[in-house]
Image (cartoon, coloured by chain):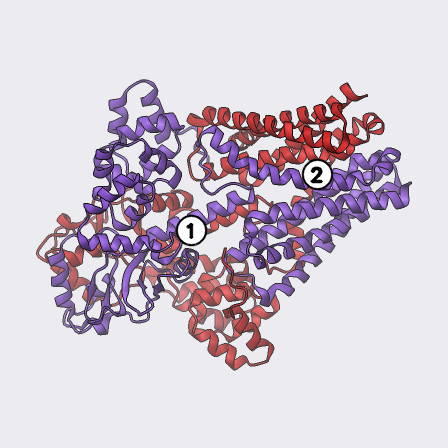
Chain colours: A red, B purple
């Protein structure tokens, strides 16, 4: 986290220009920025200002800015554009970006956009659209350059020069046989550093990692990270080259995964844009509050079972939040590590038992330590040895229960095909609240009344 | 999150081979994997098994596996290696990886490793080591290829061919003047697609994004993501070329940032490796439990102020966790969005007020809605209209307080140069607990006793 609060930021400058009514100024300022920077600025503005800024963006940047915006903001801006602007904006888009945007377009315009493409691009777009967005097929760009294995690098160089300007994110070309079957990857680094007489088949990398269209985007992201891939071919089941995935698209997947994981732990939607309209945000967050309310009343009903005890020993009411919250914190620690490690592919059935032992051991050690400390504090403040023993025992029990729940809850949820990052926290704190209240008030009933 | 529990995984196969005592099998299996995959497997094993597997790794892979391991696991493995193995493992390392490893080496070996380098590499290593690990300088690889602007591409191609094999992660070379001052970037994609008679100065990209050594790693990561950069030059204050940063290193930064953010929200260390020894993990987690204990007793002391009320109206003790937990959930939602948006550079002083209004509006809307629902549930279960009104009012108050705290806490912490991702949650739940108990029990005292 950086601390740049006092520096005049791009957003600060833009807001200033807008507020002083200097739209010319703001437009000139925007035209100096990269599309991704403009997209970030737009996402950082309240909805009303977003439309103003979007109208100030140079039309030639429209396509690139749209491609960079998050889905929610993009569909709102698109809804406000007229047909001519939309057609102009989508005209020069790369096919993989266009595939993302098409879903947001009104039907009447989709047809026009598709008709404006060449027949080859139309087929390719249909191809990309036929795969789920979160698969290798949905990530890939169908535009690739392919050469045959039995030509020399000199021929390849002449071919590339004839093609002229390559897209920015081209780092390699692919080698295919006469049936379009993939044979290997030819990195430009090899092309420029090898003797021009060498044959493609001797310089290409036949072992380069490839993906099949159906693979999940998260698997693609993991492989790109682990194997330091920058571009890779995407093949169909017959080994034919369909397209390529490049690191810039994968970086977006990695960021979105992290976003989703972080936000879902608080019960938030991955698209919960900070500047979404109030009502939309209210409704989205209400769901999680509702789930929490149900579990909170469940915990309250546990407390309710001990009304008689609480009437007699009111100090139990004072201290019961301490027991519950220690369990909640310890359990959340275990759960967070489990969920993170599952997302990174490090936790599976073959090491689950070891993990369970480890976490329970940590829970027991921390349980004993904190039970002692809580008991001592209770003695100091309330001079009540019996209450101190009861709360100490309850803390120890709850910390071990928290460790068990922290490991088992994500495994059980995964088996049930529920994402532990989303549902784990609420299930876990329900367990620690119930166990905490039950053990503390139960022991209190046994020994203090 | 994927569901692949039933597939036989690499980890499953490796564990099986180890448990059946077939070390030959395990070694052969490992030799087929990429270093990064081996590193991930090692990180997924309990400490005792880690050493066994590490000894089975082919020596030629040692350097690459070490470079891929996380700091904690790496330093443990290094501690168990003898001098000869360490020297062999560090021999072929890239300078930027070596810089990461050097810190973990015993002093006696560091000197030997450094002496084994060529003088030029020694100077370069010293250079990399002189920058903090989380700066552009710490991320950069000092090995770059530079050419002059006034030569033709044909000359560049001949030069590159004379150099022979380039490192895997080379996507461009750089253009410098005779004083080593940076002029631009020359992408291989341009080299292979342009006429060989063209001059470097006409084909290079003088506008390519560059970094200065002091820039923070998180700024580098943000620019790489926003501008779809794959490699960029790192310059000193005199515009001289010092090295380059490539996307593979930045992807690691992006992942580590996400890790840190997710883990720190649960008060965990970013290095909290799931298979760290029990005692180490216990101590690390104890800190956060201690902080939580202090705030829990603070909340308990608020409850303690109302002992007299609780004795008379015991239902308040039963329902008080509901009020606190609703506030906690709502506040965590706002806080999570704020922290995430701050990390992505979308929240700053110029849009803070708007955000505050928005979150308070959401808090008020959800507050009214949930106050009504909680009150209705209370009437249904306890048939007590007075208690229902009190709990409804307390829920509404706490949800608005949660929204205020969710926005203000991260701003205040950032001003105080404390990372809101780490400290935000504990401050926030302290606020919602205290406000929740105070408003519920306070209103209860006023209207129910």
Q: Residue B154, can we see it?
A: yes
- Res B357 quadrant in image: bottom right
Residue B60 vertical placement versus B228 (above, below) = above
Same subunit: marks 2 and 1: yes
Q: Residue furthest right?
A: B449
Q: Position of residue A1 (x, y in %)?
A: 50, 55
Residue at the disc numbered 2? B297
B295 sits to left or right of A28: right
Give the percent coordinates (x, y) of residue B118: 17, 51
Classify 10 Å Cα crowding around label 1: few (below 14), some (14-19), many (20 and above).
Answer: many
Q: Residues within 10 Å of mark 2 (few under 14, many from 20)?
A: some
Q: Is residue B41 left or right of residue A422?
A: left
Residue corresponding to mark 1: B254
**On the rendered structure, is B38 left or right of B337?**
left
Q: Is residue B46 above or below residue B383?
A: above
Using the rendered image of the protein, determine whether residue A112 is visible from the camera's viewpoint: no
| Residue at disc 1, secondary structure | helix
Estimate the x, y position of residue A193 in percent, counting from the top left: 15, 57
Q: Chain of mark 1?
A: B
Q: Could you tell me how far apart the alpha carbons at marks 2 and 1 are, in whole angstroms?
A: 37 Å
Q: Quadrant of the C terminus of chain A?
A: top right
The one nearer the camera, A167 or A239, is A167
Image spot of residue A427 (x, y percent): 62, 34
The residue that appears at 53% across and 38% down in the rendered structure is A336
């Amino acid at each position: 986290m950086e601390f740049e609060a006092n520096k005049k930021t791009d957003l600060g400058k833009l807001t200033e220009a807008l507020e002083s009514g200097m739209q010319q100024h703001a437009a000139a300022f925007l035209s100096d920025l990269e599309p991704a920077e403009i997209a970030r600025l737009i996402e950082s503005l309240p909805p009303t200002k977003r439309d103003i800024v979007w109208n100030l963006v140079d039309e030639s940047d429209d396509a690139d800015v749209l491609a960079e915006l998050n889905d929610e903001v993009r569909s709102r801006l698109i809804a406000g554009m007229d047909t001519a602007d939309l057609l102009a904006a989508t005209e020069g888009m790369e096919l993989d970006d266009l595939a993302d945007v098409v879903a947001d377009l009104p039907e009447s315009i989709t047809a026009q956009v598709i008709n404006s493409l060449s027949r080859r691009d139309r087929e390719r777009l249909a191809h990309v659209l036929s795969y789920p967005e979160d698969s290798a097929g949905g990530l890939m760009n169908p535009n690739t350059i392919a050469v045959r294995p039995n030509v020399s690098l000199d021929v390849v160089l002449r071919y590339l020069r004839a093609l002229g300007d390559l897209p920015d994110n081209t780092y390699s070309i692919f080698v295919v046989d006469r049936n379009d079957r993939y044979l290997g990857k030819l990195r430009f680094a090899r092309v420029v550093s090898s003797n021009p007489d060498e044959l493609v088949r001797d310089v290409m990398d036949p072992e380069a990692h490839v993906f099949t269209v159906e693979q999940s985007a998260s698997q693609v992201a993991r492989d790109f990270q682990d194997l330091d891939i920058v571009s890779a071919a995407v093949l169909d089941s017959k080994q034919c080259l369909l397209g390529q995935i490049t690191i810039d698209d994968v970086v977006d997947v990695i960021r979105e995964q992290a976003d989703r994981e972080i936000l879902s732990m608080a019960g938030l939607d991955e698209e919960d844009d900070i500047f979404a309209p109030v009502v939309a945000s209210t409704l989205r967050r209400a769901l999680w509050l509702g789930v929490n309310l149900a579990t909170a009343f469940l915990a309250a009903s546990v407390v309710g079972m001990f009304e008689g005890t609480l009437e007699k020993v009111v100090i139990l009411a004072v201290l019961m939040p301490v027991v519950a919250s220690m369990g909640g914190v310890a359990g959340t620690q275990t759960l967070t590590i489990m969920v993170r490690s599952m997302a990174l592919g490090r936790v599976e059935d073959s090491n689950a038992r070891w993990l369970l032992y480890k976490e329970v051991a940590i829970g027991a050690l921390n349980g004993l330590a904190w039970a002692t400390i809580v008991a001592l504090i209770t003695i100091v403040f309330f001079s009540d040895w019996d209450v101190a023993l009861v709360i100490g025992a309850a803390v120890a029990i709850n910390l071990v229960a928290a460790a068990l729940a922290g490991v088992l809850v994500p495994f059980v949820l995964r088996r049930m095909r529920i994402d532990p990052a989303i549902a784990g926290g609420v299930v876990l704190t329900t367990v620690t609240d119930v166990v905490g209240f039950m053990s503390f008030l139960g022991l209190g009933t046994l020994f203090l009344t």
